[in-house]
Image: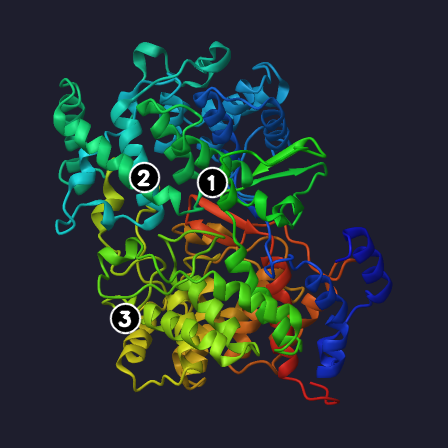
Amino acid sequence: MKDNAAIKESISRDLEPTPADAKELTRDGLLSSLAPTVERFLSQQRQDGYWWYSLEANETIGAEFIYLMHYLGEVDAEIQEGIKNRILDVQRSDGTWAIYHDGPPDLSTTIESYFALRIAGVPADDENMVKARQYIVKNGGIEECRVFTKIHLAMFGIIPWSACPEMPAWFILMPNWIPFNIYEFSSWARATIVPLLIFMTLKKNKKAPNNITLDELFRDKPEQRKFRFKHEKGLISIENMFLITDKALKILNKIPISPLRKYAISKCSEWTWEHVKRTEDIYPALAYCALAFKAIGYHNDSPQIRKPFQALKMFQQRYATAEIPALPDEIRDTPAARPSKIREIGKDPFVSKSDGNRIHQQCCISPVWDTPWMMMALLETGLPPDHPALLKAARWLIGKQIRTVKGDWKIKNPLAKPGGWSFEFENDYFPDVDDTIEVLTAIDRTAIPEEEKSEAVAVGIDWMLSMQCKDGGWGAFDINQNQQLVNRIPFSDHKACLDPSTPDITGRMLEYLVTKGYTKDDPRVARAIEFIWNRQKPFGAWFGRWGVNYIYGTWNVLMGLSAIGVDPSDERIVKALNWLESIQRADGGWSESPITYEDVKEFSGYNVSLPSQTAWALMGLIAGGRAKGKAASRGAAWLLNNRNAEGGWDEKHYTGTGFERHFYIRYHGYRHYFPLLALGRYAKELSPGKEV
């Protein structure tokens, strides 16, 4: 495999960056122009067969790792310095931090970043810290920050625990048949909440490093400070009912420790450890696991702390440039250095920890998501299905299928057999429908012998079909995950504790089922189509749960409806296509800001076009039968004309959605495989030698 410098040099020679007009392209000409791009992406395949790109979120992730090190009493000065430099790198000129590139300032993110920098030795009178402090106080101070920020401040005594919502450990004991239990929370919330039940029942404080008090970040004097939870106006509301309950729980929590509390903590401990042993999940779940067991009294060398702590270190990227590299550290190609192996040996395999002075703490890792998407992009641009790279990738994916572990999904879906795929290298308890769809799609398209893939495909389809919800749609990790009460408790100020059916996943599911012979006559398909129609917005688009936002949702739905045979002249399809064309930018591309998740009346794009969102819009138009139209032609031309010197695309903006309004992701793979996939599909609409 070539090194990056050699790849860049060869591609720069081969790729002629002359402007392209899609109207002048033939299929062969377009595919030929993409050849250097294909070679570039083939070179990024890892030795085991997978593709894996960086995930970039906001700076609370790095800040909270600094907190974690200090709470555990195990501070790596080099890591702290690297994270500090990363946080300073992305601070804006006004002193604030945001939750996505070019987004508005975010109070809680700015507070957490400021606190981490103070811990790491940046003085309070530093010019940039002064700017941050001015913004924080002007916008309500620590008193107005989110619940998760309050928890991290409380654990160092910056604010009292009473400022946080009560989360009693005995909540784990609630039976599954009542409306309010841990399995009514989404998988990501559940994996975070259970260790938090321990941590927030025990309320073990650590002294803040360097005697930091953060008094400068409070709006009011100590005797005047009030910490309020967001609630509905008026005396009678569900939110206010929960606030009254929270006050009652605070009183009950002052009662001396009871046998019930001890038993509940033990059940939370069992649940947490059982899940962490078999997972490589998101940052909060792993971090709170380590915090919970530390609060119980476990030593840092115990597996319960060592394994999640080391796994989080594996999420880190060390780099020396101003930009995060698209590919995570190459050391991860060494099997002994993978998180699953670290869990076995319990030791940090890094010898030389850094070639640079910046460290980015990823929130998660995505090889099982990146790999099938890159496979599909390469297939659509003409790579033969028996190409060794594709066969190797397909076999790697087959080996990642979860066949023996019944994850948390079994609580609401007890009769189904396991057969899904998860997002990460290892996450047995939390496979998801979205990943499983794309993995099966890619495996089906390769020339892997039937005897190697048929059983995996059959089991995977059965599991996905079993995950259809009562409303006809599909969610990601669970079925019928729509108990609205859980989003209205004081803890859920982010409103991200549910995993309901979504149009984007349901549309993708329809697209895949067609390849297996399912038609509109199948009752499951009919219910899914009805779900999609019921979710269309008045202006024609569909909400995007896992990508920003309406462009993503509309593309996925149009792909599904087109595949299943819905007439493109259907007025609802026409409305969606017209909407896509109406938001095209003057330069031919598309973009959409996360602001569209807010309650706004007008569409909001960025002031630049983005490769990933342009690709989604182009594929939506192709699916709707408008590949020969002017909008599609201009979109394809924009993608062709905006490649970088290496044959790929650049994109700093965040187009992935973790939790709308609160957590967005810059998937570095999105700017690579989605534009290539879109251009490959566009090429199929061209005839060899025939101009559009």
Q: For mark 1, what is the residue?
A: 343
- Mark 3: amino acid: Gly
Earlier along the polypeptide chain: callout 3 or callout 1? 1
Badge 1 local density, few (<14 within 10 Å), some, or many (20+)? Answer: many
Q: Badges 1 and 2: C-beta atoms under 8 Å apart?
A: no
The residue identified by callout 2 is 272
Instruction: Indicate which disc residue 472 carries.
Output: 3
Position of 233 compared to 605: left or right?
Answer: left
SS for callout 3: loop
Residue depth check, mark 3 versus mark 2: number of the one nearer the observer: 2
Residue 350 position by quadrant: top right
Question: As shown in the figure, which amino acid type bears the numbered disc 1?
Answer: Arg
Q: Quadrant of residue 650?
A: bottom right
Identify which residue is drawn at 74% across, 82% down.
Answer: 28
Which residue sits at x=72%, y=89%?
690
Q: On the rendered structure, is 564 left or right of 180?
A: right
Camera-near label (1 vs 2) is 1
